[in-house]
Image (tube, helix red, strand yellow):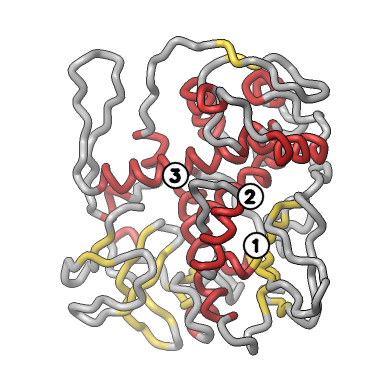
Amino acid sequence: MQVFHCEHCGQPVFFENIRCLTCGHALAFLPDLEFIGALEPVGDKLWRSPLPVAADRTYRLCANYDRENICNWAVRADDAHPLCIACRLTQVIPDLSQPGHREAWYKLEVAKRRLVYSLLVLGLPITNKIDDPQRGLAFEFLADPPEAGAARVLTGHADGRITINLAEADDAEREKRRLAMHEPYRTLLGHCRHESGHYYWDRLVQDGPQLDAFRECFGDERADYAEALQRHYETGAPADWQEHFVSTYASAHPWEDWAETWAHYLHMTDALETAATCGVSLRPVHPGDPTMAALSSDADTLRAPDRRLALAHLPAQQSQPRPRPARQLPVRAQRSGDRQTALRRRRDRCRAPDAGAPARRRRPVRGALSRSAADASHIGG
């Protein structure tokens, strides 16, 4: 995440802020500029940014900002939709009459907005299911049903719908699950990043020109998914998984290898953007080592249309590929190349995403998703 400042007083402000604590100006994230900016009211519930690049634009506050105090993003005044581009991705929310549900919803929306910010910076297509029911992305935030013995909500992705169990927003419960699942890393943002990887595999890889390259690097996704997961949970990851995968779960199946690699890529680009905008730079002694230049925090320079900070500053390390042994899964293709090579391939493909990829096949989700009409409220259409 980059470093933001109030345009009026220069005070540092943060991604979730709604008001500058020094000068009192209202703040909002402006998706078209990818920037948290100060706003000045111009009447009729419209706002204007003092940034020169936004001189000809006016904004409205997202309905979830204005009415629900859940969001802090703005909507261009010429956009008729009441919700911002992040909030309109959410199709199902929990029953807000239940204690703690509103607070949990807020935490989930914060994580989702941080994901959407990264997707905007990377220039990836972000389409909701209101505008594109077949190929759009949707989030469903659901709580486990209160009835004893009822099926629990499982976090996962299927056909462009990312479901996250509301219990994940409880820090103590999430830590309990992290330990039970033997996961060193488990966060709300991590869930969003991982599941979005499944969605973008459907959008950018499936049945497209990159499929052969995917199989060369990650393996053959036609291997039985349910069987692979069962084997993973019964026997665990290979002893040498650290030589070939970014996590133990990535070793379960090519789809999970892709999603885990996607999530880790987003982790790294987020950290690199933070470092670069804080003035950190790398000037290696040896030619060919990773380099990184510090970036100006000036809003107009930083958010220029052709800037893709995370991509520009991801180190392209030079390393010798080493063979990666085939895992014992049906229809498994031999894989080669180390993790740095894999990440460079992912980076190069993300520069020009194929928004015209054909329709998706249904991927088995990690268990049946439970949805109760009594437990869910719909927003955004």
The residue at the point 19 percent across, 79 percent down is: 23
Q: Position of residue 346 (x, y in %)?
A: 54, 30
Spatial CA span between label 3 and label 2? 14 Å
**With 175 as the anchor, is 142 left or right in this view?**
right
Work out whether mark 1 precedes mark 2 in sequence or the reverse, and give the earlier one: 1
Q: Secondary structure at mark 3?
A: helix
Whole-number angstrom distance, CA of label 1 to CA of label 3: 19 Å
Q: Amino acid at mark 1?
A: Ile
Q: Mark 2 is on which residue type?
A: Glu
Identity of the residue drawn at 55% across and 62% down: 174
Whole-percent x, y for residue 86 in the image = 55, 64
Whether 288 is drawn above or below 376: the answer is above
Residue at 69 percent across and 41 percent down: it is 203
Most foreground residue, 208 or 366: 366
Secondary structure of the residue carrying tag 2 is helix
Nearer to the camera, 160 or 81 = 160
Instruction: Look at 67% across and 46% down and name the residue there.
Output: 199
Q: Is residue 344 above or below residue 235?
A: above
Q: CA distance from mark 1 to mark 2?
A: 9 Å
Answer with mark 1 or mark 3, whichever residue precedes in sequence: 1
Quadrant containing the C terminus is bottom right
Determine which of the numbered discs, if any, sits on residue 267 in the image. 3
Q: Position of residue 212 (x, y in %)?
A: 71, 20
Residue located beneath label 2 in the image: 195
Kind of residue sitting beneath label 3: His
Q: Are marks 1 and 2 in contact (CB under 8 Å)?
A: yes
Image-based side of 80 in relation to 223, left or right:
left
* Mark 3 or 2, nearer chain start: 2
The residue pinned by badge 1 equals 164
